[in-house]
Image: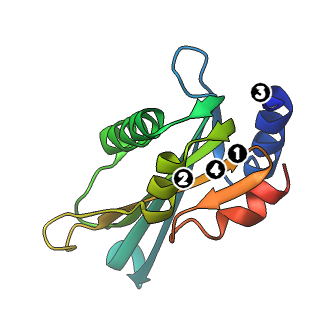
Amino acid sequence: MPDVPRMTEALERIYSRDYDVFRCDDSPWDLRMEYHVRCGAHILTRGLEMWSAEDHEYVYVRSGDILDADALDACLGDSISDAMTRIRPGNGHRCSTVTTLLLFDSVTRDAERMIRVHGYHRSFRMSLDGWVNGRVGALVGGRILTDRLGRDLKKVLEQL
């Protein structure tokens, strides 16, 4: 099994500058991290807002021994369902990203294929109330696997 305590501490150190980090002792997740940003423009005073946009990212970290297709499906489903309870689509919400980081010893071919072709997108009211994208990155036995949206996660996972 990977050195999970060292890796979670490294992830916590990497993300803690910009993200709110939560240790998850009572859930299957090792860490959960959240990032929230709001931009906007005002006319004359702060009370007269021209526009605003909120972006959010929810990062979930899980570790284990063998990553097979069932375990991967459960990890991705759990992260999406938990993040959806935190996302509030509506006026001002632009984008939310759900990132699943997996730290495992080994991976099956089916799970590896599922990671590479993974894609999750959901829009709210034809994107008028924003959208959600899902991405996944895995560090498996020294190899880094990502889907198309998670390619930039390689830089983070290489630091572990």
For the point 53% across and 49% down, the residue is 109
- Residue 67 at x, y = what percent? 56, 36
> Circle 2 sits in a helix, a strand or a loop, which is it?
helix
Q: CA distance from mark 2 to mark 1?
A: 10 Å
For the point 65% across and 70% down, the residue is 152
Q: CA distance from mark 4 to mark 3?
A: 14 Å
Residue at the far left: name it. 125
The mark that comes first in sequence, 1 or 3, is 3
For the point 71% across and 57% down, the residue is 144
Q: Are marks 4 and 1 in contact (CB under 8 Å)?
A: yes
Q: Which mark is residue 1?
A: 3
Rate crowding at label 4 as few (under 14), some (14 to 19) or many (20 or more) other CA atoms within 10 Å: many
Which amino acid does the dot numbered 1 rest on? Val
The mark that comes first in sequence, 2 or 4, is 2
Pointer 2 residue: 112
Q: CA distance from mark 2 to mark 4?
A: 9 Å
Q: CA distance from mark 4 to mark 1?
A: 6 Å
- Residue 94 at x, y = what percent? 35, 69
Q: Are marks 1 and 3 in contact (CB under 8 Å)?
A: no
Is the N terminus in the top left, top right, bottom left or bottom right quadrant?
top right
> Where is 58 relative to 94, above or below?
above
Q: Name the colour scheme.
A: rainbow
Q: Are marks 2 and 1 in contact (CB under 8 Å)?
A: yes
The nearer-to-camera label among 4 and 1 is 1
Which amino acid does the dot numbered 3 rest on? Met
Please indicate whether residue 68 sits to the left or right of residue 80 in the image.
Answer: right
Q: Nearer the viewer, residue 59 or 117?
A: 117
Pointer 4 residue: 138
